[in-house]
Amino acid sequence: MPENGNGSNASQRQLAMVFNLDKCIGCQGCTVSCRTHWKVDRPGADHIYNIWCETKPGEGWPKGWMDIGRKKPDWVRDYGGSWKFNIEEVFNSPAGQEYLHPVAEETGEPVKYGPVWDEDRGGGEWPNGYFFYMPRMCNHCTDAPCITACEEYCTRHDKPVAMTKRASDGIVSIDPDKCLDCHMCIAACPYQIPMENLETKSYEMCDLCVSRVDKDFAPVCAKSCPARAMYFGYLDDPDSYVSKLVNEYKVALPLRPDFETGPNVFYIPPFIRPNKITLDHEILPDKDLPIELLREYFGPGVDQALDTLNEHREAARNGEESELMDMLIIYSFADAFTPFDVIAPLEPVQVEAADGQ
Amino acid sequence: MGNEVTKLGEKDYVMPEIDPSRNCGVRSKDDDYWDFDEWKWGTHRVNCYPGSCPFRVYVKGGKVVREELSCTYQAFDDPDFKVPDYNPRGCQKGLQHSKAMYNPDRVRWPMKRVGERGSGQWERLSWDQAMDEIGEQLAEIIDKYGAETLIDDHAPEGSGVVRGAGEASAPALAGVLGGTSFDLNFLIGDFNVGQYLTFGVFQAVSGIENWFLADTIIWMSNPVYANIPDIHYMLEARYRGAKIVSVCPDKNPSAMMADRWVPIDWSADPALWLGVCKILIDNDWVDEEFMTEQTDLPIAVRTDDNRYLRESDIVEGGNDEQFYAIDASTGQVGQIPTGTLEPAFGYDLKGTSKVTLVDGTEIEVTTVYNLLLERLQDYTPDEVHRMSNVSPDLLMEVAELCKPPNRVFVFTNWNTGKLYHGDLVERSYCYMLALTGNIGKPGSGTRGWNAGFEFLTAMPIVAGMPKEILEDPDPMGKTLQLLLMLIEDYRERMKMDPSMPLTEAVFGAFRELMRMAGVLAPPTFFWMNHAGYRDVWDEQLDDPNAPRKISEYADAAEEAGWSTTEEVPKREFPPKMMFVSGSNPLRRHRGRSYFENVWPQLELIVTADTRWSTTALMSDYVLPAASYYEYADSKYVSPHTRFMAFTDQSVPYLEESLSDRSIVVKMITAAEKHLKKRGIESYVVGDREIVVDEMEWRATMGGKYAATNEDEERMVNDAWGALSKLGWLESLEHDPDVTLDQMRKDGMAWATGRPPWHSIAAINSDMAPGEVLYPFRDQIEQKIPWKTTTRRMQMMIDHPWFVEADEHIARYKEPPAIGGRKHEVRLTSGHVRWSIHAIWHTSEQMMKLHRGEPFCFLNETEAAKKGIEDHDYVRVFNDYSEFIVRAKLSSCVRPDQLVIYHAWEPYQHPNWQSQDRLLPGPPKGLHFAGGYRHFEYSLWNWAPSQSDRQTNVSYEKAAFQG
């Protein structure tokens, strides 16, 4: 087990996701495939996202999550409320009278925020504006503060605990039948991940597609990534790309390690970037992306990770073999998900009882 | 049914019940996720490119409940190259179609407007009634005004190759009834004119996997938005050590992922590339053997008129397409062979010589290479800096990345061709590729788009064939055989030139075939004569460097009878009926004049679509087309991937929708019935006799395939049979017999060999399953001549107009003002991330992933100066028109720029006015040129194309704020 696997909720094994932010193109393929598979026609699911991609720097979603601290975001202010479109009005009125746009159901006003509001705005000053894309999902933390908060609340109210971390693979999930809608999980999560289903009054979040994982299929977001920027596997499996990227090469880093929750979602920082330039287009020595920003997000390990990545790329350019670069290339797509399958399932299947907690 | 008004956009589909606790983690064993009835293959017949992403579509209770990328692409087994596999290939739009197909914008029944056009009042009709009314009106219009007044505006949306909208079916309506069908590539403007000028073709694409083999990749586009399924090959090349250089005025999302960003000034790319060429030559970083063998650089040029020396110049009655080079050993000119690129003697690139003309005068000749050197004197690093703002250091870096033996790939999308001086941009980077020998080799080259050879068996072509072909049991196979015969005929009989390269013969034969079907015209003169653009272009284009006005070029071309004008819908036939299929002209057409001038002239507008587009909402009749999971067909194959992807009938036609082909057949049948009712038996259009009794018979390929699902599935099977019989399709197991059953098993098949479709011929290489594809191997490996006037890659264009404009050798020209010089902001655009053109732009799922309505990007600092805050509405205007849009502020946009990614439905904007309104879209006058071997119009190739990028605008905070 890696060094981040020693917490109070530690599982026997741990599944992990790695995002290569040097390859992520912000297309929301992960977001959309997740919604197609899980946010289906069921009550309240339509405004819930288990994964989404943010443009960084930017306020993200919920608005300003990195700075909110540990408290429940406001549905309308921070998430943007429930979006509703006036398509019937547009179609059934004379041409030009009404135009298609979203309003927040709660206020009846045009929406003021949403899951991908900051897209492609970024930071810096012309001509050195910059941004990169960063998908966000539940980190399935080793020391998951949401579980601690849930346990604390449920026990105090003499109810069964709704949140668990599965021993066999470290998946953190919420049982909706047990969820008391107390909001403790979101208030405890520094990443502001769990989302309340306003209709069923229970919380939902990514469960790493546990229904698929139990049948050895990779999570749908990861296998649907057109940029091939996602990896999935067990951290203790020496053959898995995730373990090599996280443990061996140490180029995949947790987001905001200073939150100290032991995330099991890791990010390869963007390392191929254009240089800064002057208004007269003279090239400056620094890359456009401030290193301080990467350090803030990914901790002090980011300097070493960037050095390793750049060294290996240079070696590859000189014709040398690099296992690390080959793993970023991914010659065979399926290799990024060992031992899980990427081919779409053929049969409706009966699932064996998953092992308990 | 009857006269009551039917409301649109109601969301009342009953979907299968889903366990409310789905996706609740701990209870995967109880989950109903695996509870589906069956799966079918699916792909999306939209006009994304190359598309054809393989999905599995899951069905429950007669509804599609989700789709998933199949990840079933085979690995490459090319012995020469190690490249990543294609999986998963797809994008977020395709991943949500199972929801979009039930979006409230679906068209569900035949509809007829009740009030005025655009009143939003609709009545539901039965198919019988709709066809009866439309047939009657079609017959009346043909009777009263002539069939020429029927206009087909089609595009490739919904384009299944056998049964789909646009290409596969729509042109047959015009073809069979004798109307005018427009060339979609010039409606759209996806013509890479500079590549065409240089190579004689613009569709010489490589496989997407070839990008991975480049050492240096030049981005002149925004693949992060526009090439989502395939960009990984370029991002992954970086991990082999390849460097990416992004050349772009703004710091677009792709530039963020490059090693170098070159923030070029407006349209100054030729300065950059000519500066690079100068450095390459000055440092001897060139491939002289390639230049001598493959290009026109050694061709002798008359110094008196800057034109190639031709045999007709020096021999009475000589050939005006026989060119000369200077013999390095003798200093005299000698003839360059026309049938091969093998040099006949040692060509002197840098020499000069003297020749005596037919009239006895002696003149000096030089070489194209010398003219290029002369041109490059103007492109010193300091001059390049002045013209383009690219610093000398940055220029040198780009040059070093291009120097041999680096394999250089220039990645452009559909943007350079939409610049007014896009030809100069493309020609100048092609110079770099030519000087460094980066053509016809793995990891090298550039790209246009290329697709659709399967349309050879589709209704628009086959329906126009001679009667004996339609009487044959295999009309599709017979059509293909006719084409193969025409190719030999074209080379050896029609043009009497056995040395003609195959590519040119295929273009010519294909042109003949299309003429038989009678379906084709570039829209330029329609715009000028019937849509008001003759005046708009002359008024709105301010180009002090152009020798003549656009209208003067157009008139001269028409007077000369050049082919750019020969298939004009005649002036005396104003448009009376428009059929819209796979298209959305009121979204797509540049400039308000189109709607303002064309719409009032039309007495009948019929739109067939899956969804309520703006055009549909402004039509008289709207017919419901079935969507991508509702009938068996394939999407067009692009050589970029070479996989033909199959989409099956996962669920029945939704409500009363039908396949697009069925709709067209029904319309033709209805027209025939009502023409007969009027006693019309035949009529003449141009040189074609239209026989009324043959109409339905032709549309059904001799009565063999009726407008039923069953017959059309058989038609799909037969079409693939005809193509695979000639070796152009094979199964994944390399079985040469591709059938519907086989596709239901594999979900895809390989395109192979070299089908004689003009754009495939343009590649000049064979498609070999499992192997990396790169173009122009014929030229490099077999020394087969190029499809250009000189039979060589042409650095020089010596058409008199190009010489007059001093563009015979590419150069930098200041961009014109379009829309008013006082408007100092340039509007730029490009493919959008969230939709495929307008398709899926109004899908609720996609709209939630941005701001839910149209927006433009503005420079944060400049916007603040005007008191504009993020998400304010701004008014964008120029001398021609205006529109209102939300502002999104960023520091990645130039201060003098407004970026609006394209294809929002007009009804997403206040007043239904989108950015297309204020784009006058003038073509470049030089592109009306003809009378030059490779300046001959054929489908998708060589006609004037509208420019729309870098239009001049101003913006201010709008009074309207919602």
Image (spheres, coloured by chain):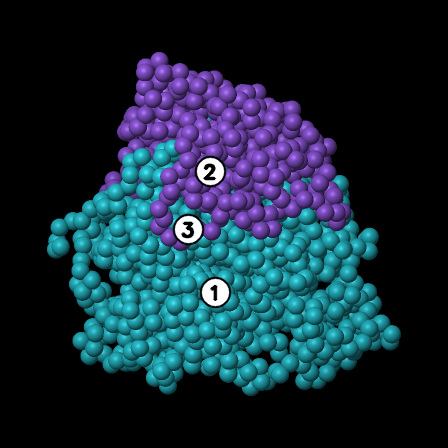
Label 2 element class: strand
In the image, which lettered chain appears cyan? B
Which one is in front, A207 or B316?
A207
Viewer-nearest of discs 3 and 1:
3
Label 2 – label 3 distance at C-alpha? 41 Å
Which label was assigned to residue B749? 1
Which label was assigned to residue A345? 3
Which one is in front, B779 or B201?
B779
* Chain label for disc 3: A
Q: Amino acid at mark 3?
A: Pro
Marks 2 and 3 close (CB-CB < 8 Å): no
The answer to whether residue B639 of the structure is visible from this angle is yes
Give coordinates of residue B425: x percent, y percent.
62, 53
Q: Is residue B860 left or right of residue B690?
A: right
Dots 1 and 2 on the same chain:
yes
Label 3 element class: loop
Label 3 – label 1 distance at C-alpha? 20 Å
In the image, which lettered chain appears purple? A
Q: To which residue does mark 2 refer?
A: B856
